[in-house]
Amino acid sequence: MDNIIDGRQISKKVRTELASYIERYETQLGFKPKLAVLLVGENKSAIAYVKGIMKMAKLSKVDVELVEYPDSITETNFLNEIRKFNQDSEVNGMLVLMPLPAHISRDNVFKVMSPLKDVDGLTSANIGDFYYGKTTHVASTPKGVDTLIEELKLEVKGLDACVIGASPVVGKPMAELLLQREATVTICHKETKDLRKHTLNADLIVACAGVAHLVKEDMVKENVIIFDVGVNFIEGKMVGDCDFDHIKDKASLITPVPGGVGPMTIATLFTQTYNAYKIMNNL
């Protein structure tokens, strides 16, 4: 269907363009951008994410180094590993995969990580810069949606947008990106009294609550634009926050799960690693 947004194809376009930029600088410098991916333990979703990153890195020409640590690593030792990568001039970006074991504080990880190398845009410095209009590194999933909007040449100025989910990683930065595009934004969350009232009014919906099939057909109006960020599993099958099969015919544009926003998240990590590479090498 023409209204289904092919995130894989658009991600491929973004990564192909990125590769052309990297080739030019690789010839000049003799090395490519490098992303260090840090994995603690054996979380299945994190491992699946790593596989996607490694698979997609080849086309982009970003080098990816996977560093694995046992669940038993102490927080002190893990923070020292991050400090080591902060000082490594060959590493331009760092991604710490979530979830972390309970004894390692996510907050402490992002306090220690270099903001320049935080290509997922989650350090306090990067979050603060983002809200002041500086965009070196932005939370990768919302930025992936924003890139889809850009690539599709969607005019969202003046649209009523509804973001379902208020996390600091997706929902809040997504709302800010839409505000920067001059949409009128409503943020809904688990305490919202009447979600349907807000979604029915929306011209554009970003579903990022993490609840399988939360958004039903009777909750959206005709010709709505939907970006489904949800990653949920029902009987082993990955599904989004929207009831895709029943909504797709009402939407003017909709992302599937999988194959929609996910590939754009990874493309954003590579793009932001490249941006750090340019800054670190004064390009």
Image: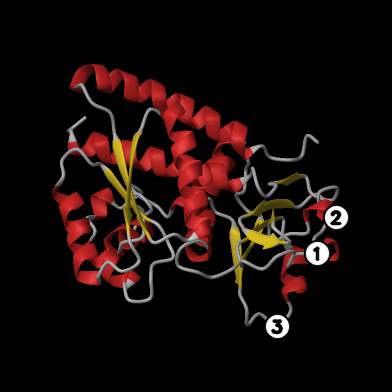
Rendered residue at 61%/67% (across/down):
209
Query: Residue 198: x and y, percent?
Result: 72, 70
Q: How dense is the environment of label 3, judged by Cα within 10 Å: few (below 14), some, or many (20 and up)?
A: few
Describe the element under mark 3 as helix, strand or loop: loop
Disc 3 versus disc 1: nearer the observer:
1
Residue that mark 3 sits on: 193
Which of the marked residues, 3 or 1, is nearer the chain's N terminus?
Answer: 3
Residue 14 is situated, as x and y percent measured from the top left of the image, at: 49, 31
> Which labelled disc corresponds to residue 216?
1
Near-viewer residue (226 or 43): 43
Instruction: Kindly tell me whether residue 241 is visible in this rendering.
Output: no
Helix, strand or loop status at disc 2: helix
Q: CA distance from mark 3 to mark 1?
A: 16 Å
- At x 30%, y 18%, the residue is 24
**x%, y% of residue 40?**
36, 60
N-terminal of the pair, mark 3 or mark 2, is: 3
Q: Does residue 51 lie above or below 187 as drawn? A: above
User: Mark 3, mark 2: which one is toward the viewer?
Assistant: 2
Label 1 element class: loop
Q: According to the image, label 2 marks what residue?
A: 246
Q: What type is the residue that disc 1 sits on?
A: Lys
